[in-house]
Every structure is written in structure tokens, then in C-alpha cells.
Amino acid sequence: MDKLVSLCKRKGFIFQSSGIYGGVNGCWDFGPLGVELKRNLKNDWWYNFVQVRDNMVGLDASIIMHPDVWKASGHVDAFHDIVVDCKECKKRFREDHLESKVCPECGGELTEPKQFNSMLRTQLGVSEDTAVNTYLRPETCQSIFVDFKEIYSSYRVKVPFGIAQIGKAFRNEVNPRNFIFRSREFEQMEIEFFCREESEEEWFSWWQKEIWQWYLDLGIAESKLRWYEHPKESLAHYSKRTVDVEYEFPFGWGELQGLANRGTFDLTAHSKASGKDLAFFDQEQNERYIPTVLEPSAGADRTTLAVLCEAYDEEEVPTSKEGETETRVVMRLHPKLAPIKAAVLPLVKKDGLAELAQDLEAKLRRKFPTYYDHSGAIGRRYRRQDEIGTPFCVTVDFDTKEKGTVTVRERDSMAQVTIPIEEVTAYIEKRVTLERPIG
Ligand code: GAP
């Protein structure tokens, strides 16, 4: 983990928020490479779970909602962590994260456990007297329930169907930790899938298969994934059943995504609290009912961390000196996720090669993110791209001038092919785009 965290900072993937002021615990900034990586991941999720499906639609709702939403959803009363405070150093800990009955920092005595609501409060309104207390959403899905009727009646979708949303969520986590795994501000990719209660088990298994396949298609090894079934007594207040997909991080197994059967809990609660009927009207059957909700809920940051952990690799490779080797750090990111798809490198800066390479790079960057680099030995430049996961390096050399060809080097195998310069765009584009046929 230490190596990965330092590479992420050094190369501009991810760094601490407000670093020059000492940082903010549990908040992270995604730099030039991180933003591309996370965006590719979110686009891939949207492509797979919304765009190619005829039973899914999207939503982008506001983060701040009416405060009554959080009463009706049960979050005001039940979104609690059980915490203990150290009587000596005054630090607070989640009771379920403790391994012993004393303070893990200073060994001091701990208080009795108490409840701590982890929603982040905020105030809406311009005057102190009239401002309304509300919360930054702790999960994105509540807006899907609240907007359910608007969506199904305006877009004319019929149960079974799902509404998907990607967006920020906020939780005042007691102990943010493990880099971006547990933060206070993070992004969720959530689906609320509405179906009839009779078919809930069938759809639940169907979602399990779809979710699992998505992780495999991101390039995650199946041996690093497992399902965890929550025992009945530890289910969230809204859930009839929850299974999590867990990934084996360097710090242990951790949840990437939950799949919950929320039953009719949310639509019923919001119908009651708002006085607006959120039942679905089935015109064909002439029947009004509250559908059952299945919820695949994934974290964009955790999945980004998982693909980074999965991709990080070190291998011994020969140097130019006979019998000597060096360590190559390579991020074996799936090409569709890689922040930079191709680096364009002139073999030398002189003799017009730099200009030729710059022209090529300008052409390629209209199709996908690229990087131009002419500083240092070519081997060093390859290594720099390996470290950030660039799947292809295109080298412009003297043959480019004479024969119109370039060399394309592939990151994982380091194999090189020579192709005509006008074929480079198509050659790379074919290998880096999002696409997955669904069965
Ligand atoms: N709407 C259901 C829900 O929010 P959850 O299990 O609390 O369920 C869903 O959260 C996903 O959101 C988790 O599987 C995880 O990937 C992500 N997530 C939750 N809390 C997080 C945190 N503090 N930091 C980063 N990701 C988090």
C-alpha cells in the first residue's frame, strides 16, 4: 500500500485534499491522471449498466435534499456508528474497529459505547434565523426514490426497470482510513432496480452475475473477489437481504459494492411522509402497487483503489548492460481504464523527429488522451509511461521520415510492432475503447 500511495502522489493520481494547509482527514483530490482513471471507470460503469440496456435510465439529482427526506429514509434515527472515546487522549473510535478494550493510540481507558450519527450537517438559507438545517446526502439513492414517479411517468418506463446515478456522497466517518477506501467525501455508483416481489429472487441472482462480470471485465482477478452475505442481525435498517462483493486489498478484504434487497421500505416511507402516492400503476394489469427494490451500490473510489492495487506490478528486466537487471514498475491497468492511452516519443529531438512526433500527438489527442515526451533516454521514457499504465508508446524514428512507419510498443509484453503512421489512430483506438457485448 505504501508504494502505491507514494506512486499515486508522485505521479499525480491522488493526493491529500488541502495539503498546503496540513490536509483534511478523509478527503482526497484526484490529480491529472487520477481524474482520467476515475472518469474512465465511471464511464465504463455507465456504459455497461445504463447505455447498453433497454431497462435502465439515468439521473443526476441534487446533493442537498429536503431535510424530511432523511427523517423518512430512517437516516436521522438509524444512520449511526457505535463509538467510544478515549478518556486520556480524547480520540474517538468505532467500536467495531477495535481489537481490545483500551485506546489503540495511547492505551487509555475508553468511555461506554454511544451512538454517533454520521451524516454531515449543513445549513441552507441566507439568514441565520430562517436557515434550514439539512444534510449532505450520505447515499445517492434517496433522490431516486423521491423522484421515482417523475421518472417513470415522464420517461414512460415500466417495471421491471432501473434508475442509475453516479454522484458524491458524504459521511462523517469516525476513522477514515486505508487511503481512499474509507473517506468522508466519496462517489457512489448506484442503481435502484424496481421489480415485482414475486420475481425478486430471480432478479437478485441476475444482478449478482452482472456485477461479478463487471469486475472481471475491469481486469480484476477472480481469485481476489468474493461474496459476503450479511447475517440477518447486521442488516441495515432498510434491508431484507444484502450481499457484498469484496476485494482482497493489501490491507485485507474490503467491500467494493453491496447488493441489497430494500423491499418496499423506501417508496412506502416516502409515500407516507410526503403524502404523495409513489405506487407504480401497471396499465396492462390495471393494478397499482409499490414495487420491490434491488440495489447494486458501488463505490467509485473503492473500485479505483481496487484497480490500482490490481494493476501495480514490479518485475526484473534486463538493462542494456550484459547480465544486469533492474526493477520495472508497471501499472497493468486495463487499456480502457488507463488515463493516458498513448505516449508519443521522438527517438531523438533533432533532425525534425520532434516536430513529426508533435504533429502525430496532436492528431491522436483528438481521439484519446495522449502524452508527448522527448526528455531522457528512450528506455527511461518507456519506464515513466509503464509506471502510469500507458498501454502504448509510439516511437517516431528515422524510418518515420524515410518510410512513413512508427514503432508501437505494448506496455505489458514490451513487444514492438512497426506500422504505417496513418494506421496508428485506428490501431490504438480499437484496443482502448469501452465495449462489452452483453449476454
Ligand atoms: N445506498 C446503499 C449504500 O449506501 P453502503 O454499503 O453504505 O450502501 C455503498 O455504500 C458503497 O459505497 C460501498 O460498497 C462502498 O463502495 C461505498 N462507500 C461507502 N462508504 C464509503 C466511504 N466512507 N468511503 C468510500 N466509499 C464508501
Image (cartoon, rainbow, N blue to C red):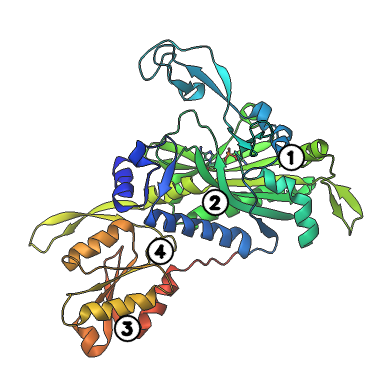
Element marked by disc 4: loop
Q: x and y percent of residue 104 in the render?
A: 38, 19
Q: Which residue is mark 1?
A: 266
Disc on res. 335: 4
Asked whether the beta carbons under mark 3 and mark 4 sit within 8 Å of each other, the answer is: no
Ligand 1: which quarter?
top right
User: Mark 2 belongs to which amino acid?
Assistant: Trp
Q: Up-down: is 354 above or below 436?
A: below
83 displayed left or right of 439 = left
From the viewer's perspective, is residue 203 above or below residue 241?
A: below
Q: Which residue is mark 2?
A: 212
- Identify which amino acid the numbered label 1 is placed on: Asp
Q: Position of residue 26 (x, y in %)?
A: 44, 36
Nearest to N terminus: mark 3 or mark 2: 2
Mark sitting on residue 421: 3
Dot 3: within a 10 Å radius of its alpha carbon, few (fewer than 14), some, or many (20 or more) residues? some
